[in-house]
Amino acid sequence: MSSDPASIESLHVLYQSDDYIIVDKHWDIRIDSKMWYEKQTVQMQLQHHFPLLADPSTYYGFRFCHQLDFSTSGALCVALNKAAAGRAYRCFKDRTVTKAYLALLRGWVKIEKQTLDFAIGKNAMEGKTHMMCTEGTEGCENPKPCQTELIVLEFGVYDGDPVTKVLLQPLTGRTHQLRVHCSAIGHPIVGDFTYSLGADDSPYRMMLHAYLLHIPLEPQHLLVTAGDPFVPAVDPKWVSQHSLRTLNATIESILEQRKTKEKEREVAKREEERRKKSKQPRIEEQSEEQRRACQEWLSEWAGD
């Protein structure tokens, strides 16, 4: 990932198999578009680099398993056939996918680890219908529960202003969730033009990056990381002054927690199956007992 604008040629592939391609999406590029004037999209990049893999039976030629905002960079999974898309979709639907994003936030975040718990809905205010908002704000319609885990990694400055480098883990999947949650705690994402109402326009991009993507497919899980773009080598305006924890150690901890949750789900699944099996004999015994009672009643009735 560089500070250069996107181009049709600038497609970085993180992973490729017969069923999936995972790319490191560039900042400020749409995944797909029906607008004739959109000359650069991830869809067009894929068609340029992999013309033989495009599926003519789909509108865009490729099946995107999830979404990333126009301004967000990072790991994006693309299915190469309908069956693969279905398997990935079930993982997203069942919320077994693990995602983690890197971000630079305005100001210094005081609470090192916290869960951001704000319901998010659509903004119905005139001129803001393209935005989302938190429950209780004026014009907020149909808010739904949303949670994001925030972990502080580093404190520093961006172009002389105080910023915090954080890792964000969405536990739900609402539109603009990370951007709205960070803004709600008074630490908007650096370069977020939309949720700063146009005020934060000096950075060359919005500093939000999909770093980790884990999809628990069978028989082989997909696990990729898209390199950290928020380093001085890429953008010298970012200067780290104090590190609380390393990115690698934090990711390892998240993956360990994921393994623990998977084991808990497996145990719960086996327990549920055992419980259902243990109920089955009792049901059969009750049914047999009912049949005997019915036969006795019929015999008595016939005797009368």
Image (spheres, helix red, strand yellow):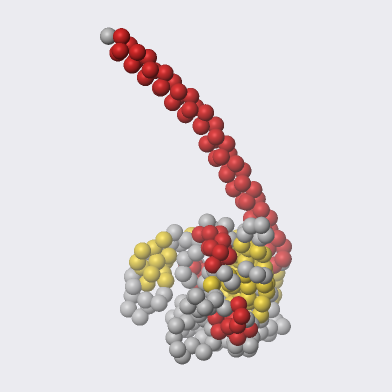
The tally of labels here is: 0
257 displayed left or right of 60 = right
Judge by depth and name the residue closer to the eye, 92 or 300: 300
Judge whether 146 appears above or below 188 on screen: above
Tell me where residue 129 sits by quadrant: bottom left
Of all residues, the one furthest to the front in this rendering is 302
- Is residue 112 in view from this perspective? no
243 displayed left or right of 185 = right
Q: Quadrant of the C terminus?
A: top left
Q: Residue at x 67, y 72 (%)?
A: 16
Of all residues, the one furthest to the left in this rendering is 304
- Is residue 234 in view from this perspective? yes
Tell me where residue 119 sits by quadrant: bottom left
Judge whether 45 appears above or below 273 on screen: below
Judge by depth and name the residue closer to the eye, 229 or 219: 219
Judge by depth and name the residue closer to the eye, 115 or 142: 142
Q: Quadrant of the N terminus?
A: bottom right
Tell me where residue 123 sits by quadrant: bottom left
Q: Residue at x 54, y 76 (%)?
A: 55
Q: Residue at x 42, y 71 (%)?
A: 132
Name the spot of residue 62 as percent of width and height, x first. Answer: 54, 75
Name the spot of residue 46 as percent of width and height, x first. Answer: 59, 81
